[in-house]
Image (cartoon, rainbow, N blue to C red):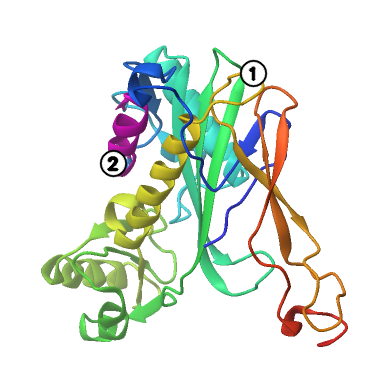
Amino acid sequence: MLSVTSTPSNVAAARGGVSHWAGSEQARSPYYQHVVAFGTMHGKERQVAPAFTEFLGAELSVPVGIDTDQFGTFSGDIARVLSPVDAARAKARLAMSAADSPYALASEATYGPLPGLGLPGHEELLLFVDDTRSIEIVEGQRELHDFPATLRARTLADAEPLLTRINFGMQAVIVRSAQGERPDLILKGITSLARLRDAIREAAEGSADGHALVEVDLRAHHNPSRRIVLTALGHRLARRLATPCPGCGCPGYGRTSTRIGLPCATCGWPTDLATADIHSCAQCSHRHAAPRPEAAADPRWCDCCNP
């Protein structure tokens, strides 16, 4: 699992911090008994709320009737044109406006080749906005994850290879026409064999080639693996917000970058592995380096020993 960061100067990202509030964390947290608006349509507050209550004494609330799908959908019926950070920010701002709250939260996910690795995976970020302090805090996580490719089907039996790989029933699927005589026909959130059978038949009948497309539903409320990641991110973000800056006291002090150059254990040449984590404040210039425990890198990571 990897942390991710965003680049704007008022956005910080970290793996998570240890609270330094004196006495009761909740009593001293600046978010104690405050309501944080969550920009979601898909129940993600259920994964994040327990940590915000435990570490901050804050309550998460989803404004009624907000439409976060306007910023793009996995199924492609609404194009996803914003970057993940910008999409999360737009969702948070939408919730903030709807709830008339200075605090908001939102998440965004992407699936595909992971940056720097090229392997299939899932990248999730959780963004917190605090307009009383003009700060944003971002926590991110990357995991290797390889959902099966979209499958062409005429019948329910044709979909079996996909269903056996995804724990169907817990993990939902989407069905659409293979060739778009009915481009509006996108059937989401399917978790039963009976409904899937009917959806494949309907989508195949609406397709010029008589096939339906069956794919994984990546939305959080139909995606168990994503909910696990959101729970972990919520915990890390809440702990981070419970950590004040040693310099100015602003909440959200934590890891924002790394210092690379861990020397090779054989030749001493600096590698691309980290020697320290850089912790900094989202509001002031205070920062410090936290050395990592590794003294040297395995030669397999060395460009000299293993070019």
Residue identified by numbered label 1: 248
Q: Amino acid at mark 1?
A: Cys
**Which mark sits nearer the N-terminus, 2 or 1?**
2
The front one of 236 and 74 is 236
Q: Main secondary structure of the magenta part?
A: helix
Residue identified by numbered label 2: 43
Residue placed at 59% from the left, 75% from the top? 119
Look at the image and tell me in which quarter the C terminus lies.
bottom right
User: In front: mark 2 or mark 1?
Assistant: 1
Is label 2 in contact with label 1 (beta carbons under 8 Å)? no
> Magenta residues?
45-61
Q: Is residue 154 visible?
A: no
Placement of 44 over or under 301, stated as above or below: above
Q: Amino acid at mark 2?
A: Gly
Residue 49 highlighted magenta (yes or no): yes
Give the mark count.
2
Quadrant hosting residue 181: bottom left
Residue placed at 65% from the left, 33% from the top? 11
Residue 220 percent across, percent down from the top left: 34, 51
Residue 10 percent across, percent down from the top left: 68, 28
Helix, strand or loop status at disc 1: loop
The front one of 3 and 106 is 3
Q: Is residue 196 visible?
A: yes
Residue placed at 39% from the left, 32% from the top? 67
Around disc 2, counting alpha carbons within 10 Å, would you say few (fewer than 14), some (14 to 19), or many (20 or more)? some
Residue 172 percent across, percent down from the top left: 26, 63
Left or right relative to 62: residue 93: right
